[in-house]
Image (tube, rainbow, N blue to C red):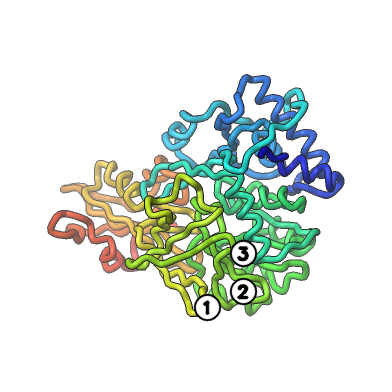
Amino acid sequence: MANEPWLARAAAAFPQRSAVEDPERSLTYAELLKLALRVAGRLRGEGVAAGSWVGIEAVGGVPFALAFHGILLAGCVAVPIDPRWSAAERALVEERLAAVLPLDDPADGEALARPVTYRLDDPAVVIHTSGTTGTPRPVVLTYRNLLFNALGSAVALGLDRNERWLCVLPLSHVGGLTILTRSAVYATTAIVHPRFDVDLAYNALERQGATLVSLVAVTLQRLLDAGWERPRSLRAALTGGGPVPAPLLERARGAGVPVSLTYGLTQAASQVATEPIGRLGEGLQPLFCTQVAISPAGEILVRGQTVAPGEVGADGWLHTGDKGALGPDGSLIVEGRLAETIISGGENVSPAEVEEVLIAHPSVREAGVFGRPDSRWGEAVWAVVVPAEGATVEPEELRAHCRRRLAPFKVPKGIEVVSTPLPRTASGKLLRRRLAELVGDGGATG
């Protein structure tokens, strides 16, 4: 059975309702549909076939929303491009794209007469995640995945017909992108900022009637530092993307900010378990359409309508690589990661990728990278390096070397230079868990 696009249905039901807003402009659902059909027409005029992957520069705002919905109306698959990728990372992704929409004027085309319908199991978006490999890996999410994410989220958080969800997360991330899809499903308003700016976010929360916001630990902290407290219109501040330090959570709730902790991942179309409104502080509850189990090894397993089909293992479960347990009431307790991926400010960082870049420097003989607990970032990327024989290593020079080759969030916040070999097993495998023992208060930081 074919389905009418969410945007077309929303525009028919609520044409004058605000669909998407950014600090510069806003569009009603009728206006968004009209312009998005021009984006779709542009793609069709350029010979881009339905089902093709089409890239979008993921800098957010109204232009991104136009491009995103236009791609879906054309029957194509939207692929956000993270502007922080290195040239090599970007080239790897662009090899598979039929086109890349510019954001200066994505609606510069002849309007498509009718949007293309879709089936629930058709691919809708591709989100790239570094995972544990360090290179962008595509995760293909279907319309079914996105629809059940919207349904499950609404059950957990409730649904206000006048919802205004503030997005300050990167739209190359599933946590940011699904704010656009949920809003279209329910014909509510998405306030989409091109990037996190504490003043703009504070204004949207205090003066523009935001009812929900999605944050990570570092953005929550910056808002609290700016004096954010007791927001009048806010129903919940969903906070996840990695560990949220207990002191920060206590500070936020002490300031009257209704923080709802959430756990999710790209492969499950964002949310897996969330603290329901009305039960904040009582634990993460799996979404109604999502089943969570714990393997004998303590790994969190997920299955259900939100899990990307290509991510399901032979046993029928998505293996998250995260360690956890289930409470007596079925709540999910996230205890850390079985995998070594560092989550810094909501971003996945592969230690092996950073180590490879460090070791490529001629003055470095060995390098080990690990996540260090950090009140601002959740985890900060730290490195320990051993100089090559006869070489002198300057930590700040190594950070500059990394900045030329890695996205900014992957660059180590601190680098410790040691003279002894790094700890390894008998087979030569790096004992990453012992690296923290080598780090003092020195090294370059930033």
**Residue at 72% in and 44% down:** 6
In this orientation, does residue 105 appear? Answer: no
| The quarter of the displayed image where residue 323 is located | bottom left
Question: In the image, is 273 to the left or to the right of 210?
Answer: left
Marks 3,2: beta carbons within 8 A:
no
203 or 127, nearer to the observer: 127
For the N terminus, the image quarter is top right
Element under disc 2: helix
Type of amino acid under label 2: Ala
Please tell me whether residue 381 is drawn above or below residue 171 in the rendered image. below
In the visual, does 183 lie left or right of 321? right
Q: Amino acid at mark 3?
A: Leu
Residue located at (74% from left, 60% from top): 210
Label at residue 252: 2
Residue located at (73% from left, 48% from top) = 22
First in sequence, mark 3 or 1: give its number. Answer: 3
Res. 329 mark: 1
Q: Which residue has dot 3 on it?
A: 238
Is 406 placed above or below 320 here? above
Residue visible at 33% across and 67% down in the picture: 296
**Closer to us: mark 3 or mark 2?**
3
Is residue 154 shown to the viewer in this render? yes
Foreground residue among 396 and 51: 51
Residue at the extreme front? 1
Q: Determine the secondary structure under disc 3.
A: strand
